[in-house]
Amino acid sequence: MTAATVIDVQGVQHTYGDVQALRGVSLRVPRGSFFALLGPNGAGKSTLVSLMSTLLPLQTGTLEIAGLDVRRHAAAVRRRLGLVFQEPSLDERLTVLENLDFHGRIYGLGGRERQQRAEHVLGVVELGEWQNATARILSRGMKRRLEIARGVMHDPDLLILDEPTTGLDVQSRRAVWSYLGALRRQTGLSLLLTTHQIEEAEDADLVAIIDRGEVLAFGTPQQLREGLGGMVVTLRGVPDDLRAGVLEGVPDAVVEEVGDTLRLRVADPAPMLARLAPDLPRLSGLSVQAASLEDVFLSLTGRALREERVSVAAPHVSPTDGRGFR
Ligand SMILES: Nc1ncnc2c1ncn2[C@@H]1O[C@H](COP(=O)(O)OP(=O)(O)OP(=O)(O)O)[C@@H](O)[C@H]1O
């Protein structure tokens, strides 16, 4: 691996007893990237992150972080990583500054360096004025910002964020992403985000779609969308008598149905729209868009990432789709 690579995972498998959580994962992520690991619950994201952060011993394969082998250089790997976990992990009895200072001590930073770093990272997440406040009194969004500040306190190469915006309101989410963007610009920090939220992965430089312990796709969001091809036509308020006709006309379309809304991915929407033209006034809405990462996920796994929102009309799944449905 060259120093230009921040994550290098090759042939990694992991089992918990009889459960095979990872089935031969291979990924190479350039330094400075914002990399998103996108997958549903149980896909294997946390297992992979735990292996990267040396919290679990590597069973099979090789794994290097910033050029350091996790088996041979576990302590050095930990020094190069910052971690922000989904579950809150601050010491609520300590002040904002004390939380950072404690972390700095664990990582062996000297007194002056701790002070300088704390000042700097609190400035980035705009918590400078709160440095003497007890962590307990901070809002959820502020706590998350403090956890990010703590994650980069020791100036890591890679910040691992496990579902970092879960439970935050929209404004706090935006704030978190804005601070992470600032950190990246200032330091060239690499980010690894695990998420099941498509919107967050859309902004990444590189995305790996992971399901049932396997990486199903790896590339830029644009590459993944282009690889899928086609356009997505959304028809809202489809009357029952029109539904069958719509579906029969596009036997190769990948279809999702939510109530009276039909979402169809088709190679070329023009013939279908021409055929539907006389009935379009009967619909309550129509849109034609490029495929999204959600469509990529659906195509690769046969399931929507948000299962509760969408059902897939299996008979209209294209049998010729190379990636296939399971
Ligand atoms: N400690 C464990 N013991 C046994 N099985 C486990 C353990 N941890 C995870 N698993 C199993 O391994 C598989 C992958 O789990 P993992 O937590 O890595 O997935 P995930 O994508 O992070 O999901 P989530 O977002 O729900 O944490 C799942 O089938 C899970 O049930």
Image: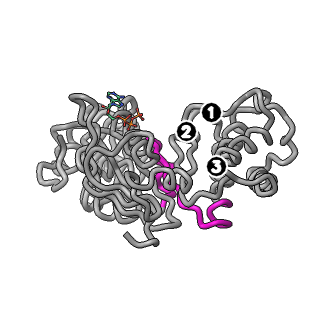
First in sequence, mark 2 or 3: give its number.
2
Dots 2, 3 in contact, CB < 8 A: no
- Mark 1 or 3: in front is 3
Q: Which quarter of the rendering shows the N terminus? A: bottom left
Total numbered labels: 3
Q: Disc 2 designates what residue?
A: 85
Q: Amino acid at mark 3?
A: Tyr
Q: Tell me residue 204's x, y (percent).
A: 49, 58
The magenta segment is: 182-204
Marks 1 and 3 sit apart, C-alpha to C-alpha, by 17 Å
- Assign a secondary structure to mark 3: loop
Q: Is residue 123 above or below residue 301?
A: below
Q: Amino acid at mark 1?
A: Ser
State the residue at coordinates (36%, 54%): 208
Nearest the eye: 40 or 231: 40
Ligand 1 is in which quadrant of the figure? top left
Looking at the image, residue 16 sits to the left or right of residue 39; the answer is left
